[in-house]
Amino acid sequence: MLFLSTYHNRIDKKGRVSIPAQFRAVLAAQQSEGIVAYASPINAAVEACGMQRIMKFNQRVERFEPYSPERDAFSAMLYGDSVQLAFDTEGRVLLPPQLVEFARLKEQVTIVGKGEIFELWEPAAFSEYIERVRKVVREKRAELKGDVP
């Protein structure tokens, strides 16, 4: 199962945000009781996923030589920058202040499915981002042709 679609939710004064029911169903199918969240390495957003995705990413990090700068960098980002967040009874998670600040989240959040992950965006920043990526897709769509493995 994949994280699909875009949702708009509120962030309450305590920093809690409701994760869409469809996303919670994907996580439940992966036997995740919450999410792992971290600052996106490529966007001004919070990335989130289940532990299954983190374990898969960890296998890739383990391919680097021990004590290499690459392994150190990915390990610091993967483990040091990630937080496990449990759902409350209403399907919400409490976002840590450092992630709220990183993504410049305020009262509203746009939650975007991206396959194996989803992202939490400040709505205006997401609007700007989606316009840029639509342009990329229009220019690069021919590269998607061919057989799907």
Image (tube, grey):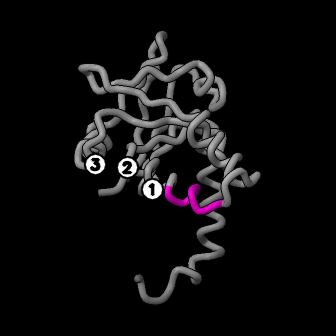
Q: CA distance from mark 1 to mark 3?
A: 13 Å
Q: Is residue 48 above or below residue 114?
A: above
Residue 22 point in image, percent of width and height: 27, 44
CB atoms at circles 1 and 3 under 8 Å apart?
Answer: no
Give the quadrant of the C terminus: bottom left
Say whether residue 90 is left or right of residue 112. Answer: left
Pick whichever of labels 1 and 3 is earlier in the sequence.
3
Between 70 and 52, the residue placed more toward the observer is: 70
Q: CA distance from mark 2 to mark 3?
A: 7 Å
Q: Secondary structure at mark 2?
A: helix
Q: Which residue is mark 1?
A: 56
Pick whichever of labels 2 and 3 is earlier in the sequence.
3
Which residues are the magenta region?
Answer: 59-64
CB atoms at circles 2 and 3 under 8 Å apart?
Answer: yes
* Crowdedness near tag 2: few (<14), some (14–19) or many (≥20) residues, C-alpha within 10 Å: some
Residue 116 point in image, percent of width and height: 42, 55
* Crowdedness near tag 3: few (<14), some (14–19) or many (≥20) residues, C-alpha within 10 Å: some
Q: Secondary structure at mark 1?
A: helix
Type of amino acid at the residue the image marks with label 3: Gln
* Crowdedness near tag 1: few (<14), some (14–19) or many (≥20) residues, C-alpha within 10 Å: few
Between 3 and 37, the residue placed more toward the observer is: 37
Q: Which residue is mark 2?
A: 52
CB atoms at circles 1 and 2 under 8 Å apart?
Answer: yes
Residue 58 point in image, percent of width and height: 51, 52
Type of amino acid at the residue the image marks with label 1: Lys
Q: Please name the residue shown 30% across and 43% down the image.
A: 27
Q: Which residue is mark 3?
A: 30
